[in-house]
Amino acid sequence: MTMGFADFVLWLLMVLCFGGQHTLSGFIEMDCKESLGQYGQPSVVECEIKMAPEAKDDSVRIVVWKKGVSILLKFHDDQFDPTLPPGYSLEPSWNSKSLNVSLLIANTSVINHGNYSCFVMTESGTANKSASLHVTAKYKTPSIHTTTTNVGSPSRVTLTCRSEGGYPKGRLGWFVGTTGQEESAETVAEAMGNGLFSLSSKLTLSLGRDPSTYTCMVFNASGGKDSEASVVLPDHVQVAGIEQEPQAKDSDVAHRVVAPLVVIGSLIVGLLLFWVIRGRPCKRAPEAAEPEVLEAVETDQEQGNSQDPLIVTSEYQESNP
């Protein structure tokens, strides 16, 4: 497609001005500032035209905003280019007599962070200037998760702190009690799908020490504190709702071992006694003596005979086969 004369002139002016970073005329200047933008909110990249007294009645002919090599906004021939990406504009009341050419960003995201350039042309000359936007996102209140390990003595607990949704990359810090002493722990930062960061940090401690409050603080890229969360570690193994029995004393362990052995031993002795008694033969009752023998014994006892009943019985049996 053949480039029109006006577009060619615009292209040539932009090459000269953006490449050389200087004004082609002393009648106009530009004043741009470093701007701050909040993620998910409207932002402004501030730039303003400064006119010399001789050019105070000039009209703005061209305004072009770029980020890198991408053109975000272009005003030319008294109209804005509708083919450029949406979401970028000048102030709503802007017209060719307005000197405020700040770029408005409707919904700030991570990709808006960085350097910009603004080119303007009036009836008296041209100027261009660099500008920057620093995008920030506040990290969410951190959460602390606890896990305990009973391997070895004493038991150990690991505190894991997590926070996400911040930008630029921040860090997590651990602090003990009211003294504010900081514990050494590494912060791991991972980029999320939207360009924001997720932070995590682990702190491993030995249980059994005095109860203490451990605080996880989230610091942004500028070093300021965004938020914090705390957890209290008691002197026994009970952490954030996770409870375990304290280590048993030696006497407790001996009692737990001896008691079952006593019960088992009693059962074994009882079973042995049962089988011994059951296996022993029962004594048979003596056979009833014959009536004649009994009568003889009774007669002898009545007569005062001191003879052994067994002998009497034998004699009686001999005489009465």
Image (cartoon, grey):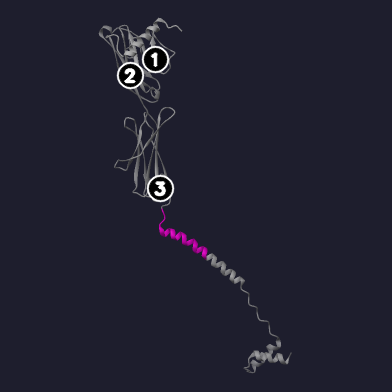
What kind of residue is marked 1? Leu
Position of residue 308 measured from the top left corner of the image (x, y, whole percent): 63, 91
| Residue for badge 3 | 238
| Residue for badge 2 | 131
Residue at 41% over, 60% down: 251
What kind of residue is marked 3? Gln
Position of residue 37 measured from the top left corner of the image (x, y, whole percent): 35, 24
Circle 2: is it few (<14), some (14-19), or many (20+) Cα within 10 Å?
many
Q: Given the current orientation, which residue lies at the most extreme left position? A: 53
Position of residue 21 measured from the top left corner of the image (x, y, whole percent): 31, 14
Q: Does residue 50 belong to the magenta stretch? A: no
Who is closer to the viewer here, 230 or 317? Answer: 317
In which quarter of the view is residue 216 placed? top left
Type of secondary structure dominating the magenta stretch = helix
The residue segment tinted magenta is 247-265
Q: Secondary structure at mark 3?
A: strand
